[in-house]
Image (spheres, rainbow, N blue to C red):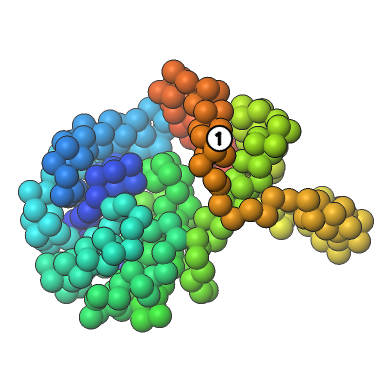
Amino acid sequence: MTPLPRKVAVIGAGDIGCGWAALCAAAGWPVAIFDANAQGLERAAAEVPRRARAMVALERATQGMVERGLLELQLGRSLLQAVQDADWVIEAISEELIGKQKLFGALEQVAAPQALLTSSSSGLPPTELFARCRHQDRCLVAHPLNPPELIPLVELVPGARTSVASVARAQEYLRALGRMPIVLKKAVPGYVVGRIAAAVWRESIDLVLTGVIDVEDLDRAVSLGPAIGWGAAGPHLTYHLAAGDGGVTAFLQHLLASFEDWWGHLATWQQLDPEQQRTLTHSVERAYRGRLDGLREARDRRLSAILRALEQSRTA
């Protein structure tokens, strides 16, 4: 069994980086977080403890482990100081290929030779991400969903030169954090989660922009409709179960023609023009104006309740 990391270094103090740091600290692991932007690092000094302690209230962590981890939380004064002695270095900067390539080139120079290097990219090709690294065997994508400290799924996307041992090590670290890693057999733009989310969101946007439904009702239609079924079973299993003993074979026999008709009417556009972007932005902001803090807290409570229910059903 792979030993737990003596220290985790998170590079990037945005929403994803703070989530990773909160998750690791809540497990009692020593964490260092660094950001080249001083304001971002200052924000992380308050945000990481807030999010780690919120996990206690949401019953996703114990207070003792959280406080133990927060006692060892470090704000890195430099990239070198942050990654020094780290067994796992998590990149969580903005989704921009050149910037990530430069960072991994720098990390290879300062990280310990045995350190695992992972990117939080949500869709960039891993072989391109790690192009400046000479030792790509220890590099791979570990893409979390937002917020990382609550949603357990993490996509692991190896590059062409990632070693099997590095993939296994990443899986063990993530499982020790209560995450559920899935490994992609090959890299595709957007990976798996991003592609599914992009397809659903495009159709959701189109239904709003074409006047079929308003923003709040669309969000209800997804969150209280297919998302509940998918949360319990996923799309393939949902349809496999839907036809009873006949399974997916019977489902296709009876409903494939309907789905094929609907597919012919789905949105196919590739870009939103500026006017469409303004309309969408106005619609979403008007729907949720002035309520974001409360809505974020409510979302986190619901996520935690859903996860508890799923966990209890697996052990029942």
Number of other residues with Cα within 10 Å of mark 1, as a class: few under 14, some 14 to 19, many 20 or more: some
Question: Is residue 70 visible in the rendered structure shown here?
Answer: no
The residue under label 1 is which amino acid type? Leu
| Residue 266, position as x, y percentages in the image | 73, 51
The quarter in which the C terminus is drawn is top right
Residue at horizontal 18 percent and vertical 48 percent from the top: 35
In percent of width and height, residue 217 lies at 66, 28
The answer to whether any part of residue 127 appears in the image is yes
Residue at image mark 1 = 280
The quarter of the picture where the N terminus appears is bottom left
Q: Position of residue 77 (x, y in %)?
A: 7, 49
| In the foreground, 298 or 179 | 298
Residue drawn at 65 percent across, 36 percent down: 209
Query: Which residue is depicted at the point 46% across and 32% down?
Result: 300
Relative side of 261 to 109, left or right: right
Q: Residue 82 or 211: which is nearer the viewer? A: 211
User: Outermost residue, right direction?
Assistant: 254
Above or below 197: residue 45: above
x and y, in percent, of residue 310 in the image: 58, 42
